[in-house]
Amino acid sequence: MSKSEYVQFDLLKLMDSSNTVIIPNGYFNGNSIASFNISNNGVLKSIVIGDDCFGKVRVFELDGLSELESVVIGGSSFRISS
């Protein structure tokens, strides 16, 4: 059985005034982050993911984002290996 770990991160620190989450280059690459979930946020309109992010993430889930209009993913993000 696999172990699941919840790491709370304050998305408000990544959110600008236009309801956009911007994840800077190189974020969320740690070994303890296997999944990433954003849910039940009715105000988020855009997600911008920088380059080289989520290197170890195997599950990326967006749920209940009724106002979401766009997701932009930078280069070399969500890569298992080079």
Image (spheres, rainbow, N blue to C red):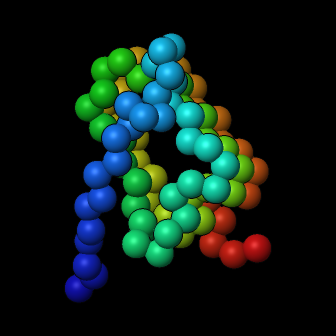
Residue 3 lies, with reference to residue 14, above or below; the image says below
- Residue 80 drawn at (x, y percent): 63, 72
Residue 5 lies in quadrant? bottom left
Residue ID at (71%, 45%): 74
Residue 24 lies, with reference to residue 32, above or below; the image says above
- Residue 50 drawn at (x, y percent): 66, 44
Query: From where the camera sits, is residue 57 visible?
Result: yes
Which one is nearer the viewer's eye here, 75 or 1? 75
| Outermost bottom residue | 1
Residue 81 lies in quadrant? bottom right
Quarter occupied by the C terminus: bottom right
| Outermost top residue | 18
| Outermost front residue | 13
Count of numbered marks: 0
In the image, taking residue 70 as reference, residue 37 lies left or right, namely: left
Residue 62 lies in quadrant? top left
Query: From where the camera sits, is residue 68 visible?
Result: no
- Residue 57 drawn at (x, y percent): 49, 64
Residue 27 lies, with reference to residue 5, above or below; the image says above
Quarter occupied by the N terminus: bottom left
Residue ID at (51%, 58%): 28
Which one is nearer the viewer's eye here, 4 or 21? 21
In the image, taking residue 19 as reference, residue 1 lies left or right, namely: left
- Residue 70 drawn at (x, y percent): 57, 26
In the image, taking residue 33 as reference, residue 72 lies left or right, namely: right
